[in-house]
Image: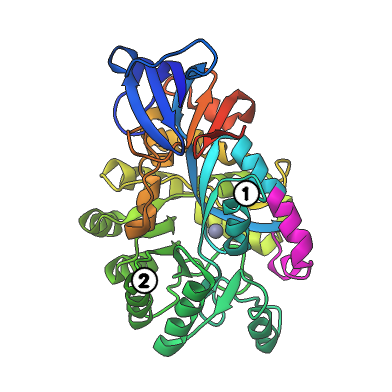
Amino acid sequence: MIRIEATRLIPGRGEPIDDGVVLLDGDTIAYAGPRADAPVEATGGSGTTPVVKVDTVMPGLWDCHVHLFGTHSASPSYVFAEPVALRAARACADLAAALRAGFTSVREAGGLGIHLAAAVAEGSVPGPRVYAAGAALSVTGGHTDLHALPPAWVRDLSRWEPSIRVCDGVTGVVEAVREQLRAGAEVIKICASGGVISERNDPQHQQFTRAELEAIVEVAAMADRSVMAHCHGTAAMLAAVEAGVRTIEHGSYIDDEVAAAMRERGTLLVPTRLIGCEFLEHAGSLSPEMAAKMLAVYEDSGERIARAAASGVRIAMGTDVLLSGPDLPAGWGNNGRELPLLVELGLTPLQAIEAATANAPDTLGPRAPRSGQLLAGYDADVIAVHGDPTRDVGVLADPAAVTHVWQAGRLVG
Ligand SMILES: [Zn+2]
C-alpha cells in the first residue's frame, strides 16, 4: 500500500478536493477522497504504509491521438525509407519522454505502436500503456497512400510496415480491419477524409463510401473494437458518425449538423490542436503545398470546434504528436501542450483535464479500461504535479512540473 497525501486532489471528473488522500493497493486505487474519510493506515514506521506528500494529485494523463513513427521528418515518402529498427529505437525514447511528462496511456492512430505496446506491457520499455490501431486504413489515393510512389510499391510496403494500409471496397476494407485485429489492434483507425500530410488529396473530400464505413464499423464491433475516424470535411464526418465510429479525429470543419449528430450518438471529438499550431509556427518544416493545406484546414477550425464543444460535444484530448524528440514541432514529450490549447477553445481548465483523463478511456468504447479517474477499483495510474492546474493548466504542459508518476501502482517517474 502507498498513501499519497495531497494539497489538492483532482479526481478527473467532478470538483477538486482540498487536502486529499489516494491509497494505492498494488496496481489498483483502494481509496481516493478527503483525508478525513480515508481509511486509517499504520504509517511512519518500518513495515508500515509509506506516505508521499505532494502538491496536486490527479489521474495519469491520456493522449488519445499519437503516432509512434520514430521519425524526424513529416514527409511521408521519407518516413518509411528509414529502417524500422532505427525508428523503433527513437520511438522508445519518445514513450519514455511521454511517461515522464505524466502520460500513462496513449491511443495510437497508426504507427509502430502495435508492436511497441507489447514491449511496454512486458516491462522492456518504460512508457505509457499503448492502445494501438496498427495501420491507419485509407482508400487508394487517400491519406495513408504514398502518392509519389508507384501503387504496387505502397501495397508491398504495407506487408512489413505496420503503419499504413490502403484498402478499397467492402471486401477490401473488411480484410484490412481483420488484419489489424489479427495483429492485436485495440482500436481501428481509418482516414475518412483527405489530409494535410498527404500530397494529392483534399482534406474536405470524403474518402470511403458509406457502405465501406459501415462494414468497417461492423467488423470492428464484432471484436468489441471501436473505430477512430480521421476527418476534416463535413461530408466525411457525417458519414462516419452515422456509420457508428466512436471518435472523430481533428474535426476541422465541424458544423452544427455534425455536432448534433455527434451529441445524439455520443461520438467524441479529438481536436488535435497541437499539430496545427506547432506546424504553422514551423511552416518551413512542411512542403509549400502541405503548409498551404495546413493553414486552410486550421485557419477557422478553432472557432468551429469551440462552438461544437460549447454545444455539448464531448472532447477527448489528443495531440497528433508524430515526430521524435521534444525539439521538433508536434514532437513527443510535449503532449501536455494540448491542454492550454483546449482552454483557448473555451474549455475550463477542469474540462480540459477531464478531456485528458476521465473522457479518454471512452474513446476505446467497450474496451475502455478503468482508468482516467481517481476512484476506488480503478487502475493505479496516478501523477502528482507542482502547482494547481485548475488555476493554471499550463502546469501540465511543463514536464518539469510533474513530480511523480505511478503506473500500475509503481513509481516510474
Ligand atoms: Zn494522426
Q: CA distance from mark 1 to mark 2?
A: 26 Å
Which region of the structure is painted magenta? 71-92
371 or 76, which is in the foreground? Answer: 371
The residue where tag 2 is placed is 223
Q: Which mark is residue 123?
A: 1
Is residue 291 visible to us here?
A: no
| Residue occupying the point 67% across, 89% down | 152
Height in image: 110 above or below 150? above
Contact between labelled residues 2 and 1, with CB atoms less than 8 Å apart: no
Residue 16, by quadrant, is top left
Q: Position of residue 399 (x, y in %)?
A: 62, 30
Residue 133: in magenta span: no
Using a 10 Å C-alpha cutoff, classify the residue at mark 1 as few (fewer than 14 neighbours), some (14 to 19) or many (20 or more). Answer: few
Label 1 sits on a secondary structure element that is loop
Q: Quadrant of the N terminus?
A: top left
Dot 1 or dot 2, earlier in sequence? 1
